[in-house]
Image: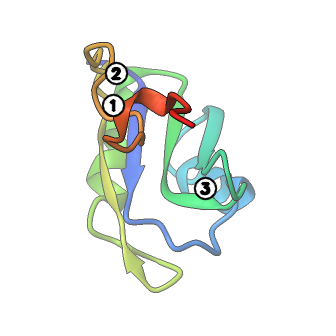
């Protein structure tokens, strides 16, 4: 088991310090990473927390999954590796001819 945890369903008011405090009660926190939107620099509602050992990570999952933090029931589980996306998928571009100027 990994010691890196995914924490979802976070209130947009939660800070990295809040996460440090909540998870620190269940073991030694190595790192917290509150994920921010690139465009607005506002929280996206999830984070990653790294505990010092897999045993402490499991303790944190058992204690905090489904528990309330700032009015939201947390989702806490082991973080999975990021899935690679095929090139060109998504991207947020419209389907209007690739941006060529026709005039």
Q: Which residue lies furthest to the bottom in this view?
A: 71
Disc 2 on helix, strand or loop? loop
Residue 66 appears in which quarter of the rendering?
Answer: bottom left
Dot 2 alpha-carbon crowd within 10 angstroms: few under 14, some 14 to 19, many 20 or more? few
Q: Between tags 2 and 3, which lies in front?
A: 2
- Per the model, the C-alpha gap separating discs 2 and 3 is 21 Å
**Where 97 sits versus 73, above or below?**
above
**Where 28 sits versus 37, above or below?**
above
- Per the model, the C-alpha gap separating discs 1 and 2 is 9 Å
Q: Which residue: 34% across, 71% down?
A: 67
Q: Which of 45 and 70 is in front in this view?
A: 45
* Number of residue marks: 3
Q: Which residue: 66% across, 58% down?
A: 21
Residue 58 appears in which quarter of the rendering?
Answer: top left
Disc 1 on helix, strand or loop? loop
Q: Between tags 1 and 2, which lies in front?
A: 2
* Residue holding disc 2: 82
Q: Which residue: 53% across, 30% down?
A: 50
Q: Which residue lies furthest to the front in this view?
A: 103
Question: Which comes sooner in the sequence, label 1 or label 3?
Answer: 3
Q: Which residue: 29% across, 15% down?
A: 84
Image quadrant holding the N terminus, namely top left
**Where 70 sits versus 20, above or below?**
below
Q: Do the residues labelled 1 and 3 touch (CB within 8 Å)?
A: no
Disc 3 on helix, strand or loop? helix
Residue 19 numbered mark, or none: 3
* Residue holding disc 1: 79
Image quadrant holding the C terminus, namely top right
- The spot of residue 22 in percent (x, y) is 57, 59
């Amino acid at each position: 088991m990994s010691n890196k945890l995914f924490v979802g369903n976070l209130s947009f008011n939660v800070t990295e310090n809040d996460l440090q405090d909540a998870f620190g009660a269940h073991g030694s926190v190595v790192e917290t990473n509150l994920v921010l939107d690139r465009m607005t620099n506002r929280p996206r509602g999830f984070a990653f927390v790294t505990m010092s050992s897999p045993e402490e990570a499991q303790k944190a999952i058992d204690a905090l999954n489904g528990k309330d933090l700032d009015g939201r029931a947390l989702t806490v589980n082991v973080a999975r590796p990021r899935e690679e996306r095929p090139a060109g998928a998504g991207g947020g571009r419209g389907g209007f001819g690739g941006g060529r100027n026709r005039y």
